[in-house]
Amino acid sequence: KAWAAIEEGRRIAPESPELDIAEAYYHYWGHLAYDEALAALNRAIQAIPNDAELYKVKGYTLRRAGRYAESIATLETAHELDPRNPLAAVTLAEFAVFLGRFDEAQRWIDEAGDTGPDGRWLTAWRGVLALMADADFDRAIHYLNVAGELNAGTIYWGWFARLASGRHQEALEVADFGPYTEYAAGAYPSEVMIGITHRVMGEPKLAAPMLSEAREALSQLIESDPRYLRPMCLAAGGQQDLDAAQNYCAEAVARARPDAFDINNVRWEAAQGLAMAGDEEGALNMLEGMLENPARVRATVLRVDPLLENLRDHPRFEPLLERIDQVEPLD
């Protein structure tokens, strides 16, 4: 229906930039077809050259396509066109954090400021930056608390910071957020996060029923949305179900959506699940796969990740982290 409406609009106004915008969103959201989305966005920008929103969407699209240098330049243009809107700066700060360019991330956060409702996102990224750069749990938790529960991702980082710093009761409180209806990168059902927290606390009898409940629910969702393989991988790993963890974690990576910026988050999650299940080599291979893409969780976080505890003494682990932490040039 959406494409039919666009075609009908083209019949009436074939050069309409509004239809180019509609077509771009159709390709971007509906089919993850980034080349087609970019072609439509370029036509729209040619017709409306000073629209910051168009540059912002183009920057997001380029990032998903793995064209990082172009994405950064495009998002910088969006920020220059509308410097009072912090959303482009939020994305640039996030970008810089995962590229290991921490000074650059701090610059974008400071330049945009934390005022207004969208400023809460910058506050959240102050927290994630504190984790990624220095494993500074106090600062991370402070900023994430101030930002609040913006989405599943900020809930996850608040939970992870508490779990990694041994604040287990606080981690349980953060994880008990109830059901959610929207999947996002880094999002797990509450039952998975609570179960994993009990596992880290050395309470397998409390972990088991939560993880079993989560796996039963997730098994009904995987066919309609393979992104649910990601929390399923973690849940199976938390139960030390080796065969299931190997299957679900491999499938989570193989069936991940085509998003260059997110794929290393999927590999990290798969490494966590495999490490908990006892497949050390499989977990390390997942971490090694992160070297294919310069946007990745940094070694500072991986060193303190309690779900990778089984890897700490492995001879491959520290040399691999040193390679992961290298800041690479962008094409």
Image: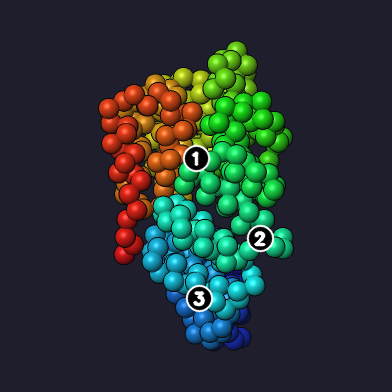
- Circles 1 and 3, Cβ within 8 Å, touching? The answer is no
Residue at the (66%, 25%) spot, across then down: 169
- In space, the residues marked 2 and 3 are separated at their CA atoms by 20 Å
* Image coordinates for residue 303, horizontal then vertical, percent: 42, 34
Residue with the mark numbered 1: 135
Given this view, does label 2 or label 3 mark the residue nearer the observer? 2
- Tell me if mark 1 has few (under 14), some (14-19) or many (20+) residues whose alpha carbon lies within 10 angstroms of its own: many
Q: Nearer the viewer, residue 255 or 206?
A: 206
Residue with the mark numbered 2: 114
- In space, the residues marked 2 and 1 are separated at their CA atoms by 22 Å
Q: What is the secondary structure assignment of the residue under circle 1?
A: loop
Residue 56 appears in which quarter of the rendering?
A: bottom right
Task: Decide which of tag 2 and tag 1 comes sooner along the chain.
Answer: 2
Q: Amino acid at mark 1?
A: Ala
Q: What is the secondary structure assignment of the residue under circle 2?
A: loop
- In space, the residues marked 1 and 3 are separated at their CA atoms by 32 Å
Which mark, residue 77? Answer: 3
Task: Decide which of tag 2 and tag 3 comes sooner along the chain.
Answer: 3
* Image coordinates for residue 274, horizontal then vertical, percent: 41, 28
Q: Amino acid at mark 3?
A: Thr
Residue at the (71%, 36%) spot, across then down: 177
Q: Amino acid at mark 2?
A: Asp
Residue 53 appears in which quarter of the rendering?
A: bottom right
Q: Nearer the viewer, residue 54 or 148?
A: 148
Can residue 51 be seen here? The reply is yes
Can residue 258 be seen here? The reply is no
Q: Which quadrant would the C terminus be assigned to in this image?
A: bottom left
